[in-house]
Amino acid sequence: MELRTYLYVPPREQEAAEAQGAQWDPRARKWYVPEGRDSEPFKAWLPLWEEERDLHINGPIFVAEAKTTCWSCGEKTPVVALATEMLDENGDPYICTLLEVEEIPSALSLLFQRHYDFFKKSFSEVGEIVCYMNHCRCGASQDDWHLHDEPGGCFFPLSPEEAMTILLRRIPSSESLVFNAAYSVSTHDFIGCYAARVDLPPDSAPYLAIAPRLGQQPGEPS
Ligand SMILES: [Zn+2]
């Protein structure tokens, strides 16, 4: 059986998606690309798609907060990662994290300056590019490679217990945002299943240049 490609269709775009041929899965309550069809005409509704070096995210966006041990001074230091949801073949969401973020969309830049000023541009020795990286209070940069792609790295938990130390803050967004970044998907959705979920702190609203999104799930087709 072929795996379904599920879509994030905002309620106001359901007619357009249906006209394009998208089909409705009443069990998963989601639209999907009909089996055998190319997903290209539907890419505006794919949870995440890439064009050249740009990553377009239609799904919800999170800031994942965690702590790591600084390789330089040995102290515990806060680290963050941008994350989004993908949809598996059952239409169930799972979390993937972004790494080597070269640009933060302007809609989010004030938020990061205000709340996460330790996440700033640096040269990554591993990726050999200038990108956003976490910095310890001692000044040492914490390479995304170690945080996201090494099993046991704080954004690559290997157990529910490790994932429970992560806090996922959902950023309300009403539009697709474009990131210049790569993304990482782990085999088990430990972050999605076990990380604590909270909204952004109330005082962060003035730092978001985007309107709140009202429910990300599509309703029944009309
Ligand atoms: Zn340090």
Image (cartoon, helix red, strand yellow):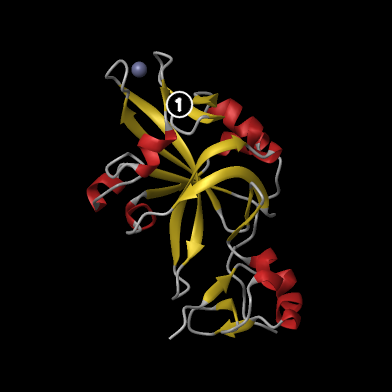
Res 60 visible: yes
Residue matched to label 1: 125
> SS of the residue at dot 1?
loop
Q: Quadrant of the N terminus?
A: bottom left
Res 10 visible: no
Is 150 placed above or below 184 here?
Answer: above
Q: Position of residue 152 (x, y in %)?
A: 27, 42
**Based on the displayed image, in which of its 4 quarters is residue 74 positioned?**
top left
- Name the residue rendered at 63%, 58% in the picture: 58
**Based on the displayed image, in which of its 4 quarters is residue 76 positioned?**
top left
Query: Which residue occupies the foreground of this view, 164 or 81?
Result: 81
Crowdedness near tag 1: few (<14), some (14–19) or many (≥20) residues, C-alpha within 10 Å? few
Q: Amino acid at mark 1?
A: Glu
Is 44 placed above or below 196 here?
Answer: below
- Name the residue rendered at 33%, 39% in the picture: 154
Ligand 1 within 8 Å of disc 1? The answer is no
Is 54 placed above or below 120 here?
Answer: below
- State left or right for residue 159 relative to residue 170: left
> How many numbered marks appear?
1
- Name the residue rendered at 39%, 42% in the picture: 148
- Name the residue rendered at 63%, 76% in the picture: 38
Query: Which residue occupies the foreground of this view, 95 or 122?
Result: 122
| Quadrant of picture, ligand 1 | top left
Q: Position of residue 161 (x, y in %)?
A: 23, 48
- State left or right for residue 112 relative to residue 169: right
Q: Quadrant of the C terminus?
A: bottom right
Q: Position of residue 90 (x, y in %)?
A: 44, 76
Q: Position of residue 104 (x, y in %)?
A: 63, 37
- State left or right for residue 198 relative to residue 209: left
